[in-house]
Image: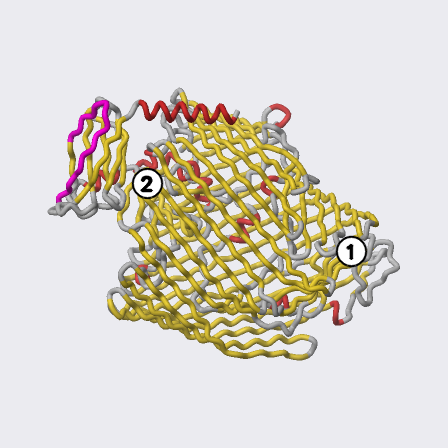
Amino acid sequence: MNKLYFFAAFLITSFSFAQSVRFDGLIQDEQKNPLEMANIMAVNNGTKAMDSYGITNDKGKFQLTLKPNTAYTIKVSYLGMKSKEMAVSTKAENMTQNIVLDGDGIELEGVEIVREMPVSIKGDTIVYNADSFKSGTEKKLEDVLKKLPGVEVNADGEIEVEGKKVSKLMVEGKDFFDGDTKLGVKNIPADAIDKVQVLRNYNEISQLKGLENDQDNVAMNIKLKEGKKNFWFGDVTAGIGVAELDSRYIINPKLFYYSPKYSINLITNFNNIGELPLTAQDYFKFTGGFKNLMKKGGSSFNVSSNDLGISLLRNNRAKEIETKFGATNFAYSINKAWNISGFGILSTSKTELETKSQTTILDSGDQQKSNENTSQKNNLGLFKLSSIYKPNDKFQFDYDILTKLTKQEEYSDLFREQIVQNVATSEDIFTTKKQDPTSINQNLNLYYTQNAKNIFAFEMQHLYQDENPFYNANLQTLPFALSGYDVTQSRNDYNQDRFVKTNKLDAKLDYYYMVTPKSNFNVTLGNTYSYQNFNSHIFQMLDNGGRNDLNNPENNNDVDYRFNDAFVGFHYKILTGKFTLTPGVSLHTYQMTNGQEGTDYSQSFSKILPDFFALYQIKKSETLTYNFSLTNDFTDINQLAAGYVLSDYSSLFHGNRFLENATSQVHTLRYFKYNMFNFENIFANATYTKKVDAIKTKADFDGINQSSVPYNSNLADETFSGMGAYGRSFLKNYKASVNASLNWSKFNNIQNDDLRTTESFVQSYTVKASTNYKNLPNIEFGYNLLINKYSGSTFYTDKPFAKLDYYFLDSFSFVSEYEFYHYYNGDKTVDNEYDFLSASLIYQKKNSKWEYKVSATNLLNTKYLNDDSFSQFSTRVSQYTVQPRYIIFSMKYNL
């Protein structure tokens, strides 16, 4: 089969080469200087179609692939210069010709040429003409983006452009569910998209653009076709299972409306076939566009979650999933100065998980093998309201509020076998996890430009978080000797209530002074204040239904924790030649107090923290960036509470109120090159982190049961991560890429009173290639190798994959995807193979609003998939049951 794919690709490529001639040369100004990123296209005089296009490289070179013995009109444009048209007739031989543009005049025809060009560049904006890359099988924005050179969409719906993550997605300049791109790429109809604009060096605040280092900030704006503006558009899909699967269903209406004054988006999805518009993982990482205000301050104080570890892994391919989802997004311009926007998301899901796993303790080699059946209910809510008031170019006032509401329940029935010192025991364990946390995050920002030299920015953010996780475990063997515990019961039924409240306020004032047009001085005054309260109580349910409260102090927590960081920062940014340099330093005064067990323990100190940024602009689209920062890392209340906390049925934790902060030095080196001449994209990134006085864990194991306490280690932890990618396009219809990622970590912990150093080394390598024809089948094929090397264990996953899509007879679309997995460890004691095949056939007459589709998931009826994970004390190998084969017939009506 592989030979067949390569042979077919070879034939297609050979045919393309044989039927074309090359037209190349230089585009220059009147002084013979090369013009980089000039646009050139060839319009076939007979068909009036654009047969080829190109963008010049840094030497002004262009190259077009044309048909032999054909008459063309060559159109050339460059920003700020007069556009040019010329007639060219090809023969059977290649042609070379230089083109000179006249700089005297305004580019009047440039707008038309930019609109026709598949790709054009104006300043920091790349504009893709979507229709130039569509083959007819595209249904959603995701399908279009994957065909654009330099653009990638991963499995989580995150967009990357030139190796950088897109942080904001907009439609017609209006936010589309700010803080997440998945809802956009999975739902915006492909036929509504006219242009895709990539906004590099993006800053939402126009007054601050150029004052800070925005090189890693990328946004994307979708321009709609004219027929989609001022009209409702979208689609309504309904489908049922075929034959014995008639209990399977999907109902999926999506409606969109855009006008200059307001926009409304409605997305719903009701199904029991495993489609998850928003997973629990997506929900918890959904930022709503809120940013880290203190990234320049040199301190790290992050409020951790008291999540009970409700199973999130692989639940998009669980044994059974039923979802009800609804979301709306709006934007409204009250007047020219005031705009409001917001969104609301509600999701309900029921999930059944079936997992087999084996956990091995690194020190002793003791093992736990388990078969676990889990039932989940997730109710998730997200609501955001934003207001932007900008009466003039000198003043802007922003306010945002984001609310998260959650209700989760999980019930597990687990059969485990322990193998401790070669002695096997087994038992049934039942666990219950319940939590309904609430968080409210608010932003208030003021920006004021006094004049061209003096700019002020005030930003404030408040977080309120209320968490109340409840945990219950019922098992035969008592894992821990808790004071006051009744050991005479037939089963051990122990429970824990936890209540954690957080109020955190960040505020900072920035003053920017423009020393010269290419340099500025920045002074920052900032403060972080956090107040947290932690309460927990362990109790036992007796055989007769009574309750035994374990009231001893070590089984309970009542802790207050106050943290304050007041700082002043100084940064100087200068552009000199090809270099941008930003040295900085911040002076901090810290105060911390935790109150528990009837006493207060306080710490206070001051510290100077430097940072440095350097950018070398090698060429217009080639950069080398270096970042250095020294950061003070602080824990929140969860590590300080000295009473026992149940992590799970085999893990007991208690904090250390005397913990101190850690210090991290981080070095990041990044190289980037993008060549629009052949859409060559080169990206490499390396980050090294060394953490001193890190908060580590002292763990004692009794078999597989773990008791742990944090402490400040005098040994440094180190991590190194690297990533590299190379991709380019060939002859307009071919695209290929190769990428690699590495992550190495070294940790120091105390396990059973012995100091242990553990290492992990994770590697991923991917090669892939694809075609993009209008009238031929298109194929994407590739291979991924994943290597997870932990202390004493190495796991491999070989994953070849392929995708075929074909639009034919002006009405039919066929799309099929295949993934093969070979999962094994170094000594082949674990050796599994499994694969997934999906396919869909769509019929839609040209210009018809009705679409008919037959689709099948997991066509090979694969039963499970594998995974592995690593903690600093153990390794875990797991096998997850996945949904069976579903065949769905659906109809869609396009508005």
Q: Residue 95: say if magenta.
A: yes
Q: Is residue 260 above or below residue 135?
A: below
SS under mark 2? strand
Q: For mark 2, what is the residue?
A: 128
| Quadrant (top left, top right, bottom left, bottom right) of the C terminus | top left
Given residues 15 and 474, the one toward you in this image is 15
Q: Marks 1 and 2, Cα distance to the nearest angstrom?
A: 59 Å
Badge 1: residue crowd in 10 Å (few <14, some 14–19, many ≥20): some
Residue in the picture at 57% in, 56% down? 745
Question: Which stretch is magenta?
Answer: 87-102
* Disc 1, SS: loop
* Nearer the observer, 845 or 759: 759
Q: Is residue 456 rendered to the left or right of residue 803?
A: left
Q: Is residue 352 left or right of residue 458?
A: right
Q: Quadrant of residue 573?
A: bottom left
Q: Position of residue 78 (x, y in %)?
A: 20, 44
Asked if the residue under mark 2 is in contact with the one under mark 1, i.e. CB atoms within 8 Å, the reply is no
Q: Residue at x 55, y 54 (%)?
A: 744
Task: Provide residue 512's location: percent of width, then percent of height.
Answer: 32, 69
The image quadrant of residue 530 is bottom right
Q: Which residue is mark 1?
A: 703
Is 178 a magenta residue?
no
The residue furthest top is 809
Q: Relative to 471, is 394 on the left or the right?
A: left
Picture coordinates of residue 94, whole percent (x, y): 23, 28
Residue 627's x, y, as percent?
Answer: 42, 61
Front residue of 829 and 847: 829
Say what amino acid the circle numbered 1 marks. Answer: Gly
Can residue 622 be seen here? The reply is yes
